[in-house]
């Protein structure tokens, strides 16, 4: 393997271990969940502050504090970060379905459909 992580031409590609594959899946899902949570909290902050920041009487309405507006806007950008993370999760799971979904590898050879199985002879 070269320093960049790419295999040399003609050299077999090294497959990561099952634990590394599962850890990467967990990290991608955690990043996706975190970005979605930040997006929801950010939008909730902006909407709640816009709806409930003003006084109830007929005086001049209060403006949203700039710090809350900036923080809510930055957190709502978590929805944009969720797009590439969702694509990465989907590609990773499609690449290693037998490890992530816990399915055993598909059998390459099978018995004939017409074969009848009989119990073993007892001694």
Image: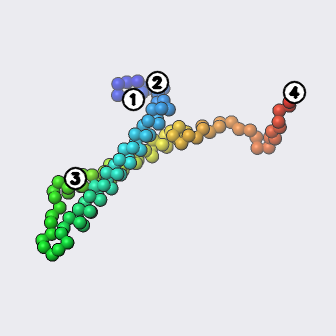
Residue 85 appearing in the image: no
**Residue ID at (33%, 56%):** 40
Residue 15 in percent (x, y) is at 48, 30
Q: Secondary structure at mark 2?
A: loop
Task: Point out the tag, 1 or 4, that comes first from the N-terminus.
Answer: 1
- Give me the C-alpha separation between circle 2 and circle 1: 10 Å
Dot 1: few (<14), some (14–19), or many (≥20) neighbours within 10 Å? few
- Residue linked to disc 1: 6
Mark 4 and mark 3 residues within 8 Å of each other at the beta carbon: no
Position of residue 119 relative to residue 50, above or below, is above
Dot 3: few (<14), some (14–19), or many (≥20) neighbours within 10 Å? few
Residue 109 in percent (x, y) is at 68, 36
**Residue ID at (51%, 40%):** 100
Residue 60 in percent (x, y) is at 12, 71
Indicate which disc residue 60 carries: none
Dot 4: few (<14), some (14–19), or many (≥20) neighbours within 10 Å? few
Task: Point out the tag, 4 or 3, that comes first from the N-terminus.
Answer: 3
Indicate which disc residue 71 carries: 3
Task: Point out the tag, 4 or 2, that comes first from the N-terminus.
Answer: 2
Mark 3 and mark 2 residues within 8 Å of each other at the beta carbon: no
- Residue linked to disc 2: 11
């Amino acid at each position: 393997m070269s320093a960049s992580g790419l295999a040399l031409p003609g050299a077999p590609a090294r497959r990561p271990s099952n634990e590394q594959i599962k850890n990467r899946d967990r990290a991608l899902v955690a990043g996706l969940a975190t970005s979605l949570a930040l997006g929801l909290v950010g939008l909730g902050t902006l909407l709640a502050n816009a709806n409930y920041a003003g006084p109830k009487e007929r005086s001049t309405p209060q403006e949203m504090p700039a710090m809350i507006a900036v923080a809510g806007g930055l957190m709502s950008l978590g929805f944009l970060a969720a797009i590439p993370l969702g694509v990465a999760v989907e590609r990773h799971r499609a690449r290693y379905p037998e490890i992530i979904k816990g399915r055993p590898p598909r059998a390459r050879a099978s018995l004939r459909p017409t074969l009848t199985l009989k119990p073993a002879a007892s001694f």
